[in-house]
Image (cartoon, rainbow, N blue to C red):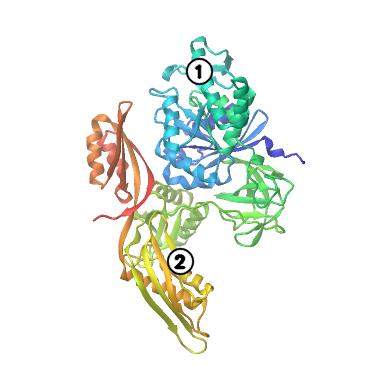
Amino acid sequence: MRSLPNLRVRNLGILAHVDAGKTTVTERILFLTGAVHKRGEVHDGTTVTDFDPQERERGITISSAAVSASWDGHRLAVVDTPGHVDFSDEVERALRVLDGAVAVFDAVAGVEPQSETVWRQADRHGVPRIAFVNKMDRAGADLDATVAAIRARLGAVALPVQLPVGREDGFRGVVDLVRMRAYVWDGGGRVETEVPARLREEALRRRRDLEERVAELHPDALEEFCADGALSDGTLARALRALTLAGTAVVVLCGSAYRDRGVEPLLDAIVAYLPAPADRPPVGGGERAADPHAPLVALAFKVHATPTGRMTYVRVYEGALSKGDTVLDTATGRTERISRVLRVQADRTAEVSVALAGDIVAVVGPKTVRAGATLCAPHAPVVLEPPVTAAPVVSVAVEARRSTDTGRLAAGLARLAEEDPSLVVRTDPETGQTVLSGLGELHLEVAVERLRRDRDLEVTVGRPQVAYRETVVEGVTGLLHRHVKQDGGAGQFAHVVLDVAPLGGEEEFAFASTVTGGRVPQEYVRAVEAGCRDALADGPLGGHPVTGVRVTLTDGATHPKDSSELAFRTAGRSALREALRASALTLLEPVAEVTVTVPAESVGAVLGDLAARRGRITDSRVRGGTSVVTATVPLAELFGYATRLRGRTQGRGTFTTRPAGYEPLKA
């Protein structure tokens, strides 16, 4: 068997809720591995990965940034992902191409709303994870409470492999329960010692608990545990890796990235437990994963326009990608030439001669490749599943202040939509205005600010509007529609009978046919379904998309000469529009789960304000002297909420949101 050079590669993402410390963890990884020679700090605006001016000003990660480092003979490709809900699409695209992830949790706050969101995203992509409980030096930090929250809220089998040495301000190190050694940091880097005597009994108890949990989950570990009554360090480490790769369990570590405590053991755990590219399932029909000798298969997951040209970020799954190669974009059927292959270090790059299977690189040369496109060898075409793009929920009208800038505005918006597929640009057919739609108020703020800065455009922005939907409350049965068109030559004839009913659950559309006797051939049934999907684009209440509809084709008729797929598609579209007008419909509005953290003395004012915003309180609890209120609030009522909350809490209140679907609009 030919050796796989990617066995010593780790492609991983850093995932977390906003302010849990993802970027600080990434910066410490870069510093400790020697990739940078000075610690970057978020509050100083000196981080490597948050290099965009808006990221440094706002103190948050807006777009995923890739960096490279080396540790213990392994090359690490680390992607620092956004934690704010408005940029969850960036996380989705990153997870699509990563092999593993480190989920960072705040030791005080535990599992926060966006922690849960990114965890579910990683679940969907089957990405193995380890957990790092950060900020162990803060007042109220509690590793056990965070582990319990991971188990309860995320449904994960969390296996803590460390015991903290000291609490809160006195946190100074960890006990490694696998090797039964202690690591402390006292200003001079990591020092390995014996387990302190005062922690020895507790460490042995936790090691025993870890062995028992692992033996329950891993057959080889169970066999050794039953035979010897304990697990060796090697067996325990191998079992933890196997459980991590299978997604059966999550190894939990702890530390304080800001104080440089616990990051080296995290790096050791990344190498020991997270998968190499060759450990992941093969793609593209290959016999084994990440084979550098196979035909090229790569996925473009991000497009970035720089002052010097267009860069396309790709993950190479099979084969090799070299400067001068010609690749096929299966999304468009066009071939593209690769002029440069670049190893990326946030906003800096270094040219390399070749990228092998398992590598994440940027390429220069492709002119039309979009995020989600598969690049492959022209003689061996393959199509990979692209990342899922979330539907936009908030829109603003954007206009150039000077009429002479209209063309530049259109070009700037097109570039934004090309780089970020979750941004959608359209023209309102009634007003003629250009409308920019995205995943939240902050998402659109950032996009508009990029227009102003990067394109030097003066723009006027309208008040944000949410994306409503329409749904059927009570449908109709037996609606008959006959489409007949005769204008010389072959005509058009289609006869359909539809039943329309509400569709339960979260499904958007379901279509079925109960026609018997071949009265409507199968190809015409498919055409009717396509026509019905066309009709869902704009509903009768206000031209909003229609969702939650079940359509059944119950009868129909054809003409021997004039029936065609076009005729039945037209009939399906017209019939469903007529049926929707005859049905009882209601508007749906997007809602968000809002988690507000405020001082106890301000909770009354905050509850009253949420009620005035049509919020429904779902949880309220006290944590560390502050009140945490969770509510479901219509998205339209949250515009400007940050300013209002600061005013009601003297600047001490904070809140986070995450999408919670759609609910009927109440008058």
Q: Where, quadrant-wise, is the C terminus in this rendering?
A: bottom left
| Residue 619 % position (x, y) | 30, 37
Kindly state the secondary structure of the residue where label 1 is placed. helix
Residue 311 in view of the camera: no
Rendered image: mark on residue 361: none
Res. 278 image quadrant: top right
Residue extending farthest top:
197
**Residue at 39% in and 78% down:** 481
The residue to which callout 2 is attached is 512
| Residue 171 % position (x, y) | 46, 18
**Residue at 24% in and 33% down:** 602
The correct choice, above or below, for 156 with respect to 553 in the image is above
The correct choice, above or below, for 586 with respect to 579 in the image is above
| Residue 576 % position (x, y) | 39, 71
The correct choice, above or below, for 47 with respect to 472 in the image is above
| Side (left or right) of 73 relative to 640 | right
Q: Where, quadrant-wise, is the N terminus in this rendering?
A: top right
Rendered image: mark on residue 205: 1
Marks 2/1: CA distance?
59 Å
**Residue at 38% in and 55% down:** 395
Tag 2: residue type?
Ala
Kindly state the secondary structure of the residue where label 2 is placed. strand
Q: Work out whether residue 27 or residue 400 is closer to the camera in this orientation and state it.
A: 27
| Disc with the residue nearer the chain's start (2 vs 1) | 1
